[in-house]
Amino acid sequence: MAFTIEKDVPLPTCYGQRRYPFDQMKPGDSFLINGDATADGVRSAAITFGRSQGRNWKFSIRQTTEGPRCWRVS
């Protein structure tokens, strides 16, 4: 199998619509985890997003009477 090397192909700036609204959240904001999302999946995505920002963005997931909820805490 041969690969063709190409030059000057721009890197996409976005891989499509974000699944979770982390980038729109301010400390104290939260969203209910529902649909096909799981708390573990959201937790993993939140950790990855927080690290990718180069800032100290922290998220917390807790069980509520409505279901699992994700908060931005810093």
Image: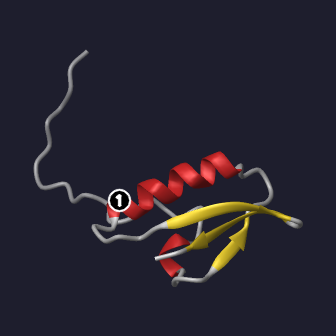
Q: Where in the figure is residue 8, as x and y percent of width and height?
A: 12, 55
Residue in front for this viewpoint, 20 or 4: 20
Horizontal side of residue 9 vs 61, given as left or right = left
Residue at (31% x, 71% y) in the render: 55
Q: Where in the figure is residue 29, as x and y percent of width and height?
A: 61, 82
Q: In which quarter of the image is the N terminus?
A: top left
Determine the residue located farthest toward the left in the rendered image.
Answer: 7
Residue in front for this viewpoint, 37 or 57: 57
In the picture, residue 42 is in which quadrant? bottom right
Determine the residue located farthest toward the top in the rendered image.
Answer: 1
Q: Where in the figure is residue 36, as x and y percent of width and height?
A: 77, 50
Q: Where in the figure is residue 32, as x and y percent of width and height?
A: 75, 68
Residue at (27% x, 67% y) in the render: 54
In the rendered image, which residue does mark 1 sit on?
A: 51
The amino acid sitting under disc 1 is: Arg
In the picture, residue 65 is in which quadrant? bottom right
Residue at (20% x, 26% y) in the render: 3
> How does the figure colour the protein chain or chains?
secondary structure
Q: In this view, does 45 lie above or below 58?
A: above
Residue at (14% x, 36% y) in the render: 5
Horizontal side of residue 26 vs 70, given as left or right = left
Horizontal side of residue 67 vs 4, given as left or right = right
Determine the residue located farthest toward the right in the rendered image.
Answer: 65
